[in-house]
Amino acid sequence: MTRHSALHETFTIERKIRAPVSRVFGAWADPAAKRQWFACHDEWVPLDYGLDFRVGGQEHNRVADSDGVPHVYEARYFDIVPQARIIYAYDMKLGETRISASLATVTFEATSSGTTMLFTEQVAFLDGYADGGSRRQGTEILVDRIQAYVERPGSTAH
């Protein structure tokens, strides 16, 4: 018999980014821009990606790790306030096994030097999946990547 469980965790990551809110928000909203930074591991093979950035819209990202195991991210957008807030829910699968379900909130605040971006995730790790901090670590990598993307000269984010 399978034992079902959900272990809850919440974390927040704040970044001071030297780019205007419009560019930081645009990096989340534009599919071509997001595809540039939305990866934790450059050596993994992209399989499929799509982004419909609107309330009710969906996003999916399928990659294969170095062992060929598919990692599948599927999200749905619940709230979008341009230049201010994004709220979405997503689940993660390893192969066919769902390992987590999350609610994420990203806020953007204009500052004299650019943007303060605050990312908060409430995650439920499912059925004994032992995360060991890798979700937060992977999200830190994503935040590093978006920061580098929007701060570099010539960024295509609007």
Image: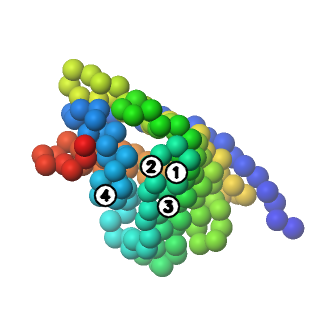
- How far, Cα to Cα, is label 1 from label 2? 6 Å
Q: Residue at x 24, y 32 (%)?
A: 20
Q: Which mark is residue 53?
A: 2
Mark found first going from the N terminus, 4 or 3: 4
What amino acid type should be assigned to the residue bearing mark 1? Answer: Gly
Q: Tell which tag, 1 or 3, sits nearer the viewer.
A: 1
- Which residue in the structure is indicated by mark 4? 32
- How far, Cα to Cα, is label 1 from label 3? 10 Å
- Which residue in the structure is indicated by mark 3? 60
Quadrant (top left/top right/bottom left/bottom right) for the N terminus:
bottom right
Q: Is residue 79 above or below residue 50?
A: above
Q: Is residue 107 above or below residue 40?
A: above
Q: Nearer the viewer, residue 102 or 80?
A: 80
- Which residue in the structure is indicated by mark 1? 57
What amino acid type should be assigned to the residue bearing mark 4? Answer: Ala
Please, what secondary structure does the residue beneath circle 4 have?
helix
Quadrant (top left/top right/bottom left/bottom right) for the C terminus:
top left
What amino acid type should be assigned to the residue bearing mark 2? Answer: Phe
**Label 2, residues with CA under 10 Å away: few <14, some 14-19, many ≥20:** some
What amino acid type should be assigned to the residue bearing mark 3? Answer: His
Q: How many marks?
A: 4
Question: Label 2 near label 1: C-beta < 8 Å?
Answer: yes
Please, what secondary structure does the residue beneath circle 1 have?
loop
Q: Nearer the viewer, residue 35 or 9?
A: 35
Please, what secondary structure does the residue beneath circle 3 have?
strand
The color scheme shown is rainbow
**Label 3, residues with CA under 10 Å away: few <14, some 14-19, many ≥20:** some
- How far, Cα to Cα, is label 4 from label 2? 12 Å
